[in-house]
Amino acid sequence: MEITLTTPALLFPAISLLLLAYTNRFMALANLIRSLKTRYATTQSRLVYGQIENLRTRLVLIRNMQGFGIASMFGCVFCMFILFAGYNTVGKYTFGLSLLLLMISLALALREIQISVKALELELNDLEESAT
């Protein structure tokens, strides 16, 4: 397989948008944590405490998602440098590593979304119990 400088450069827009989406998730989570902390201070609700514990796990996942995404982008830049220097074989392996890091980041994103959905299910269950 022939790899050129433009091959890793193709991932720049995708990784940049992905990191922006991760940052938006982080900011939304930070605001939610602040509001739940205030709510827990006044109610001492077990549901709210459960949500806070859930958010702690999600924060770790988002941090790791961002870390692997940044490592993937760094790998792409490093790959371009290596290809520019004329080391095509090393460049291929570096690009492959970048793709692997991106896949790990995406897998963590999927797990974070699954946890997020479970948190929403807790809220819906609480709402149903309150309505009955």
Image: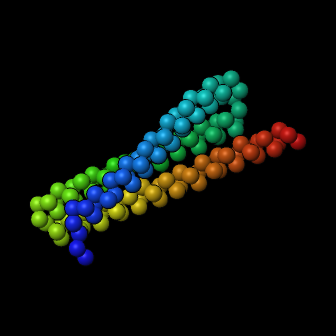
Depicted 86 relative to depicted 67: above or below:
below
Write the residue at 51% across / 42% down: 25
Q: Is residue 68 visible?
A: no
Count all numbered tags in the image, as a single digit.
0
- The residue shown at (63%, 50%) is 117
Locate residue 81 relative to residue 61 in the image: left or right.
Answer: left
Visual colour scheme: rainbow
Indicate the position of residue 21 as horizontal and vertical percent values: 47, 46
Can you give x and y, in whole percent of width and height, for residue 84 in the image? 14, 60
**Does 3 appear above or below 20?**
below
Estimate the x, y position of residue 116 in percent, counting from the top left. 60, 48
Quarter of the image for the C terminus: give it.
top right
Instruction: Give above or below for 47 relative to 72.
Output: above
Residue 114 seen in this snapshot: yes
Q: Quadrant of the N terminus?
A: bottom left
Q: In the image as oriented, which residue stretches furthest toward the left?
A: 85
Q: Residue at x 20, y 58 (%)?
A: 80
Using the rendered view, name the quadrant where residue 2 is placed: bottom left
**Of 121 and 40, which appears nearest the observer?**
121
Furthest-bottom residue in view? 1
- Left of 123 or right of it: where is 130? right
Residue 35 in which image quadrant: top right
Q: Is residue 6 above or below residue 123?
A: below
* Residue most extreme to the right: 132
